[in-house]
């Protein structure tokens, strides 16, 4: 899935929260409707079967928690739960599709479904062989059963070791204290790194981790974790490309070089997005433009993580996950550059953004209020983030009732309509979009502050706060619908004035 991820450590965020966020994007020429829901323990599958790989997993012996998710609305290709937070305030987003290379895929091939051959009961019949796990499955199989971010890494790692995967993916886990990032390596191997508390991470569909300490991963696992046999497997297949002095220790290596890619396609599709995000968040730490630039859109060595120049906000996360190269010759809506440069790189805020989930875990909030799932649907260049409490038993209908039919009765289709209209009339519509984004964001922050205070004053327990949080979410959804309908009205009017068949003279 062609997505973009940013992770923000607790000492890099504006309020001490851990923040993990990902755009879920579709393949070219495809748009999959999304919705938000809460999965109760009674609704969690007991025998899980993947639609894509036909892999069946027995979950009957596990105790499931309640959790939020953002599944495909139509369910044609499976659940694809995408992102959510469970009752222990552990968040997960899965997945960021990442790259690999021929050496890795030859050493540990992906585990793909092998269809049956022939007819059962007849000579020569070969039964189906299920494939491994993938983005369709991960959140459903992991998030309900973990109580920390580290536990999430270990549970997913065990599933990958046992069942394998049919694709290369990056998965984020967070709790109130830590963020962990896991990357799959071939069919069964994996690595994970703890995000430094004072750093943020940018992930644009490439294998990203650029430093790994095998000694720590095989020992205490303070900052790194991995497959048990990773070192031996790497040595057997000559995967480590790190140049070292004679006799130097072989514990530390660069996974991006060993397991990832640096292809011509990356330089158009992936690395420009990391460059764009870090150029915005650290404008003064490096030279980003011109012939003397430290990093260009096609640099293969853009850091996986770095300290921001200032503390990062929810609005910063939304902005970078909506970027279309503003202020550069590559902006598809801009006036700089040429026809050849504008639109030559894949933007982050692309037409096929399906949903954006920003999962914020706030250590200072009352226990029941700590997890906030900020949500947006549709193209991020034209939408807004809405603040929703995650410790609830039900989500507002406006975000849940997405169906195949286009309608303004839900948030997903309303955002898709706004984007399709505004794109062709970008300059006159931008003021309406920016005003809408600010209004919805301000309403969200105000609602969180008021509800946090109400929960604290009432001394409500985590479970006792659910009803109040559900009412707050319903109020937020009502405000959101009012603002979104008003935006659609303005954008439709502006787009109608700009139609090609307009004529200055009126009747009479």
Image (spheres, grey):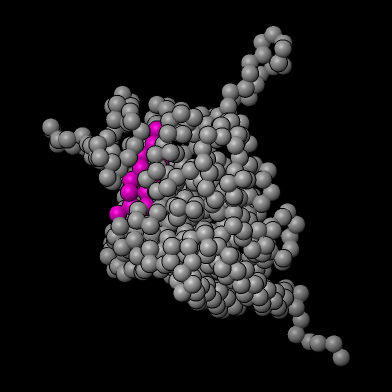
Residue at (67, 14) in percent of width and height:
125
Residue 396 lies, in percent from the top left, at 64, 63
Q: Which residue lies most toward the left here?
A: 247
The magenta segment is 179-196
Q: Is residue 416 left or right of residue 188?
A: right
Q: Vertical placement of 499 versus 262: above or below?
A: below
Residue at (33, 30) in percent of width and height:
228
Q: Is residue 198 left or right of residue 345?
A: left
| Quadrant of the image occupied by residue 124 | top right
Residue at (42, 47) in percent of width and height:
147
Asked if the stretch drawn in magenta spans residue 123, the answer is: no
Residue at (60, 34) in percent of width and height:
47
Q: Vertical placement of 50 versus 89: above or below?
A: above
The answer to whether residue 311 shows anywhere in this view is yes
Question: Chief secondary structure of the magenta span?
Answer: strand
The C terminus appears in which quarter of the rendering? bottom right
Residue 491 lies, in percent from the top left, at 66, 75
């Amino acid at each position: 899935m062609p997505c973009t991820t940013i992770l923000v450590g607790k000492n890099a965020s504006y309020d001490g929260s851990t923040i993990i966020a990902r755009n879920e994007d579709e393949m070219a020429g495809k748009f999959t409707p999304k919705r938000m829901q809460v999965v109760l323990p009674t609704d969690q599958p007991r025998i899980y079967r993947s639609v894509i790989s036909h892999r069946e997993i027995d979950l009957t012996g596990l105790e499931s928690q309640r959790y939020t998710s953002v599944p495909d609305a139509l369910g044609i290709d499976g659940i694809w739960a995408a992102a959510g937070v469970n009752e222990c305030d552990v968040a997960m987003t899965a997945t960021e599709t990442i790259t690999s290379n021929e050496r890795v895929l030859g050493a540990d091939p992906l585990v793909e479904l092998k269809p049956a051959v022939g007819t059962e009961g007849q000579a020569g019949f070969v039964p189906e062989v299920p494939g491994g796990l993938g983005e369709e499955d991960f959140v459903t199989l992991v998030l309900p059963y973990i109580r920390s971010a580290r536990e999430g890494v270990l549970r997913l790692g065990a599933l990958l070791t046992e069942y394998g995967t049919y694709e290369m993916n990056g998965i984020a886990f967070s709790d109130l204290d830590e963020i962990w990032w896991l990357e799959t390596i071939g069919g069964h191997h994996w690595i994970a790194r703890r995000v430094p508390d004072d750093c943020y991470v940018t992930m644009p569909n490439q294998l990203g981790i650029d430093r790994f300490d095998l000694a720590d991963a095989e020992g205490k696992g303070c900052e790194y974790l991995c497959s048990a046999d990773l070192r031996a497997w790497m040595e057997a297949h000559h995967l480590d490309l790190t140049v070292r002095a004679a006799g130097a220790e072989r514990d530390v290596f660069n996974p991006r070089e060993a397991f990832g890619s640096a292809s011509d396609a990356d330089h158009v599709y992936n690395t420009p997005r990391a460059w764009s995000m870090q150029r915005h968040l650290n404008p003064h730490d490096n030279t980003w433009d011109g012939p003397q630039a430290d990093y260009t859109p096609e640099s293969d060595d853009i850091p996986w993580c770095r300290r921001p120049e200032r503390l990062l906000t929810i609005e910063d996360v939304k902005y970078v996950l909506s970027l279309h190269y503003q202020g550069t010759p590559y902006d598809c809506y801009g006036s700089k550059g040429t026809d050849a440069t504008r639109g030559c790189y894949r933007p982050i805020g692309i037409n096929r953004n399906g949903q954006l989930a920003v999962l914020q875990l706030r250590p200072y909030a009352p226990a029941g209020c700590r997890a906030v799932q900020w949500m947006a649907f549709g193209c991020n260049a034209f939408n807004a983030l809405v603040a929703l409490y995650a410790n609830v038993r039900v989500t507002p209908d406006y975000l849940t009732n997405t169906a195949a039919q286009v309608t303004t009765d839900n948030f997903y289709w309303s955002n898709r309509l706004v984007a399709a209209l505004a794109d062709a009339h970008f300059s006159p519509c931008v003021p309406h979009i920016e005003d809408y984004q600010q209004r919805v964001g301000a309403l969200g922050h105000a609602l969180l502050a008021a509800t946090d205070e109400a929960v604290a004053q009432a001394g409500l327990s985590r479970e006792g706060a659910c009803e109040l949080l559900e009412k707050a979410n319903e109020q937020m959804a009502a405000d959101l619908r009012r603002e979104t309908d008003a935006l659609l009205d303005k954008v439709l009017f502006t787009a109608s004035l700009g139609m090609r068949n307009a004529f200055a003279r009126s009747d009479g």
